[in-house]
Amino acid sequence: MSRDPARPNATATSEGPIASLSASDRAAVEPIAALVAVTVVGLALGLYAGALDDAAPDRSGRAAEAALDRAERAVTVGGVVDPRRLRRVEAPGTATAIELEANGERWLAASGPDAPGPPGARSPDAVAVAERRVTVRVAPGRNVRGTLRAVVWR
């Protein structure tokens, strides 16, 4: 290739001289199009962040509260929790453990091998816990206060 001395920005080839583009001709974008593109990207990122937040594990404990409500309905007779009825608690589809503590005793109903373990073995970051005070039947005609707890693996 040879350069044309009369045109410093042009190069000569066998087909003829080619004019180069000036700096003002390169990468020109209309301001309106650029603003629309930035707005679309911003909206897309906002929608993605919203969807990602909705897909995150439930940190509020609603799943544990719902499991506790179901368990309480299943084990309560006349307003008193009967520990023998813990076997009737149905697994809600997630790894769940229902614990009942009263009078120094503990009863446990787990939904499977992936269910959370006892309080000392579970990580507070990995589970949602809901509990409430209930009346527990420990012997015929003898009731004490206890705690019914639902532990749900997130």
Image (cartoon, rainbow, N blue to C red):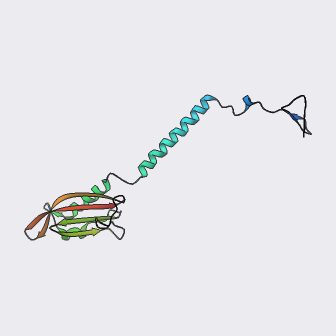
Which quarter of the figure has residue 138?
A: bottom left
Q: Is residue 79 left or right of residue 29?
A: left
Quadrant position of the N terminus in the picture: top right
Residue pictured at 13% horizontal, 67% vertical: 137
Residue 144 locus on image (x, y percent): 11, 64
Q: Evaluate whether residue 54 shows in this view.
A: yes
Residue 16 locus on image (x, y percent): 90, 35
Quadrant position of the C terminus in the picture: bottom left
Q: Evaluate whether residue 69 shows in this view.
A: no
Residue 22 locus on image (x, y percent): 77, 30
Residue most extreme to the left: 141
- Rendered view: 25 above or below 96: above
Q: 82 or 27, which is in the foreground?
A: 27
Q: 152 or 71, which is in the foreground?
A: 152
Residue pictured at 32% horizontal, 51% vertical: 60
Q: 7 or 66, which is in the foreground?
A: 7
Residue pictured at 87% horizontal, 29% vertical: 7
How many marks the image carries: the answer is 0
Which quarter of the figure has residue 65?
A: bottom left
Residue most extreme to the right: 14
Which quarter of the figure has residue 63?
A: bottom left
Residue pictured at 25% horizontal, 59% vertical: 68
Residue 25 locus on image (x, y percent): 73, 30
Q: Is residue 82 left or right of residue 17?
A: left
Q: 72 or 5, which is in the foreground?
A: 5
